[in-house]
Image (cartoon, rainbow, N blue to C red):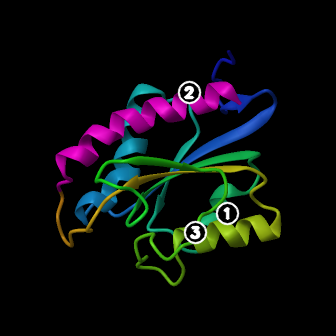
Amino acid sequence: MSELSENTQINNRRVRVIGCGNPLMGNDAVGVRVINLLQETHPEIDIIEGGVGGLGLIPMMEGYDYIILVDATTGYGNHIGEILVFSKPPANEFFPLSLSDIGVLDAVNIAEELGVCPQITIIGIEAGEIMEFSASMSPEMEHAVEDVCTLILETIKKE
């Protein structure tokens, strides 16, 4: 098993974890909660907050060989808190609408077309209905945070 290093280089590959979401919109905050927990427990991992997506994600992916992106999804899973893993961006009609001009999946698709993002794993957590202006997530989403952190650590170590 590979050890994590200061720059999160695994087998000479630069790895970064990007968490997306809005902490003021209930279950949409899950990506931010995941990276906050990872930063507390594994500061050696290269982690960055991706906000609500948009074109600003593309420079966050530049210079990395492998990206793990975490975000809430709606309409993909069977129940709130279900963890879904995609090795290619899925159709984007179900990802939450972004407050920016383009959404997370649009930015990932553009990054791939530009050759900025050679390999990506997208971890989506089914959020159900996104509550506007709520600082709390449902218990199912809170429970998923630790499971997603474990999944990310296992994914990084497998690379």
> Is residue 136 placed above or below 103 in the rendered structure?
above
Quadrant (top left/top right/bottom left/bottom right) for the C terminus: top right
Q: Residue at x 18, y 45 (%)?
A: 139
Residue 51 on the magenta segment: no
Q: Nearer the viewer, mark 1 or mark 3?
A: 3
Q: Secondary structure at mark 3?
A: helix
Mark closer to the chain start, 1 or 3: 1
Magenta range is 136-159
- The crowd level at tag 1 (other Cα within 10 Å; few <14, some 14-19, many 20+) is few
Residue 153 on the magenta segment: yes
Q: Residue lying farthest front? A: 78
Q: Which residue is mark 1?
A: 59
Report the front residue among 125 and 57: 125
Q: Which residue is mark 3?
A: 105
Is residue 39 shown to the viewer in this render?
no
- The crowd level at tag 3 (other Cα within 10 Å; few <14, some 14-19, many 20+) is many
The amino acid sitting under disc 1 is Pro
x then y, percent, for residue 117 = 74, 57
The amino acid sitting under disc 2 is Glu
Whole-number angstrom distance, CA of label 3 to CA of label 2: 23 Å
Q: Secondary structure at mark 2?
A: helix
